[in-house]
Image (tube, rainbow, N blue to C red):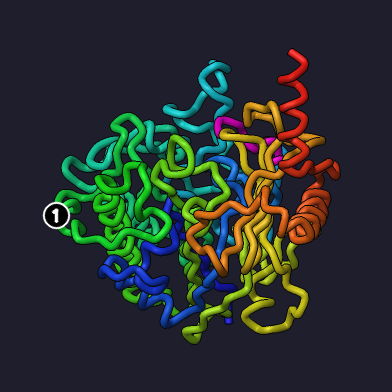
């Protein structure tokens, strides 16, 4: 068989539990549920960085965000970094990118290097050939208006009155119908939904979402908390329902074009949303509402309606994509091809996922099936790439406390657990190219704080 086509469908800020196949009681995702029945669903999937730009840097390179200098938003992917597009092009794939990029700019303070609302120059497109994108799509569009830029830097306006997900998918279908027929293709589709609309301060589903999904069942981690989920969740689900409808459109187009049998579809998100219940906004925390995401693959190598439970990270997707194309992932990629789980060839799959957290903090965390353990660096703003010292911030027993309400980090009954998790976390940090840090127990930090206060 010819090398498979690969389409990566990427949502933004989508919790795992918004999908029916992950337990959502409302009929939000019938197409994704069908995709799951035909393919492989991964039950326990987590981002490796709960911030938009850093997560994208990890996906494009297969390296952790600190390794490529993109550990916060508004950091350009270094021009010399080899991306999945480069690897796939080298073995004959046509490569295409449609949607939000978020890896071209160094921020408005750098003037000439700010492409958040301007066309991204060719050299900053990560090696993709076909291009229809905005660096920060939420800055060039709203739910029913806006634009992206084509490969020549020209604005392409969303049609008046057309919901953004629908308009973007129109252009995806246009690419599929017009692409060259003589080579396999890799198409990365980066939606902005269900990300909140920054300048409006709200999630914006299609018209009618508030009514359609008003009878939602609140997720357990949100129930009884503050935050803005009570007013925002119906529109959030409306965004996801629209994404799902457009997954159905893509699948239908693949059938019509005779491409379905030899195309691998990948659906996932960059991170979730905790709806301002863990900090003052939606992400940048270690909690499952923020870090746990959906992941479904369907196509060559991923068929049969399987559901796999081992912990999986976004960092595992770049080597998975290369393996699907018949390439051996380079040693520089930190993850593992998911084909090893599907085929049961790999017996030493990691027992935990590793996360770097930025902007709200300079933090690190690991998440096993039972434990969540998170640390943060003292006295930092969150813009730092790392630290030599961290203090213990959170410990949750996820079996007893799945909604993470009872922080055990200062409980003396869990000293040995914390010591073990600390060693595991430090090992993962070293594997990610970081210096092995000192991790202080919370009691030590509290004691030092009290001593400093007494001495004033």
Frontmost residue, 39 versus 363: 363
Residue 68: say if magenta: yes
Frontmost residue, 223 versus 307: 223
Residue 36: say if magenta: no
From the viewer's perspective, tell me whether residue 165 is left or right of residue 272.
Answer: left
Farthest residue in the bottom direction?
Answer: 304
Compared to 447, does 183 lie above or below?
below
Q: Secondary structure at mark 1?
A: helix
In this orientation, does residue 86 appear? no
Residue 100: x, y in percent? 45, 43
Q: Magenta stretch mostly in which secondary structure?
A: loop
Compared to 142, does 95 lie above or below?
below
- Residue at point 38% right, 53% down? 222
From the viewer's perspective, tell me whether residue 151 is left or right of residue 374.
Answer: left
Residue 81: x, y in percent? 70, 42
Residue 58: x, y in percent? 63, 49
- Residue at point 76% right, 80% down? 347
Give the residue at mark 1.
211
Compared to 409, does 219 lie above or below?
below
Snapshot quadrant of residue 22 = bottom left
Frontmost residue, 186 versus 139: 139
Farthest residue in the top direction?
Answer: 456
What residue span does the magenta drawing correspond to? 66-78
- Residue at point 59% right, 73% down? 3
In this orientation, does residue 138 appear? yes
Residue 409: x, y in percent? 66, 50
């Amino acid at each position: 068989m010819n090398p498979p086509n690969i389409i990566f469908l990427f949502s933004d800020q989508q919790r795992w539990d918004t999908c029916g196949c992950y337990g959502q009681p409302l009929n939000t995702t019938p197409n994704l549920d069908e995709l799951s029945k035909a393919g492989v669903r991964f039950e326990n999937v987590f981002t490796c960085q709960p911030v938009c730009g850093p997560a994208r840097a990890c996906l494009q390179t297969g390296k952790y965000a600190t390794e490529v200098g993109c550990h916060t938003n508004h950091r350009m992917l270094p021009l010399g970094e080899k991306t999945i597009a480069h690897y796939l092009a080298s073995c004959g794939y046509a490569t295409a990118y449609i949607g939000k990029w978020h890896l071209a700019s160094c921020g408005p303070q750098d003037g000439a290097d700010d492409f958040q609302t301007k066309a991204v120059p060719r050299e900053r497109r990560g090696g993709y050939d076909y291009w229809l994108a905005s660096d920060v799509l939420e800055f060039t569009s709203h739910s029913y208006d806006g634009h992206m830029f084509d490969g020549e830097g020209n604005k392409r306006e969303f049609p008046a009155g057309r919901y953004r997900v629908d308009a973007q998918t129109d252009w995806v279908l246009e690419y599929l119908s017009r692409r060259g027929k003589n080579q396999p293709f890799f198409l990365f589709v980066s939606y902005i939904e269900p990300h909140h609309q920054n300048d409006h301060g709200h999630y914006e589903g299609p018209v009618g979402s508030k009514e359609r999904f008003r009878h939602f069942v609140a997720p357990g981690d949100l129930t009884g908390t503050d935050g803005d989920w009570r007013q925002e969740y119906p529109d959030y689900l409306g965004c996801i329902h629209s994404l799902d409808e457009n997954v159905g459109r893509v699948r239908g187009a693949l059938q019509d074009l005779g491409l379905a049998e030899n195309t691998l579809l990948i659906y996932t998100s960059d991170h979730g949303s905790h709806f301002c219940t863990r900090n003052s906004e939606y992400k940048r925390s270690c909690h499952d509402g923020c870090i746990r995401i959906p992941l479904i693959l369907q196509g060559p190598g991923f068929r049969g309606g399987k559901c796999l439970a081992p912990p999986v990270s976004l960092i595992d997707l770049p080597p998975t994509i290369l393996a699907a194309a018949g390439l051996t992932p380079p040693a520089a990629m930190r993850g593992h091809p998911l084909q090893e789980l599907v085929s049961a060839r790999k017996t030493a799959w990691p027992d935990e996922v590793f996360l770097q957290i930025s902007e709200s903090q300079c933090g690190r965390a690991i998440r096993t099936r039972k434990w969540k353990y998170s640390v943060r660096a003292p006295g930092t703003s969150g813009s730092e790439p790392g630290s030599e010292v961290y203090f213990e911030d959170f410990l949750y027993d996820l079996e007893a406390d799945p909604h993470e309400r009872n922080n055990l980090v200062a409980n003396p009954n869990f000293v040995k657990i914390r010591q073990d998790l600390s060693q595991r976390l430090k090992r993962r940090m070293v594997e990610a190219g970081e210096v092995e840090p000192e991790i202080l127990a919370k009691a030590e930090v509290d004691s030092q704080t009290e001593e400093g206060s007494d001495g004033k």
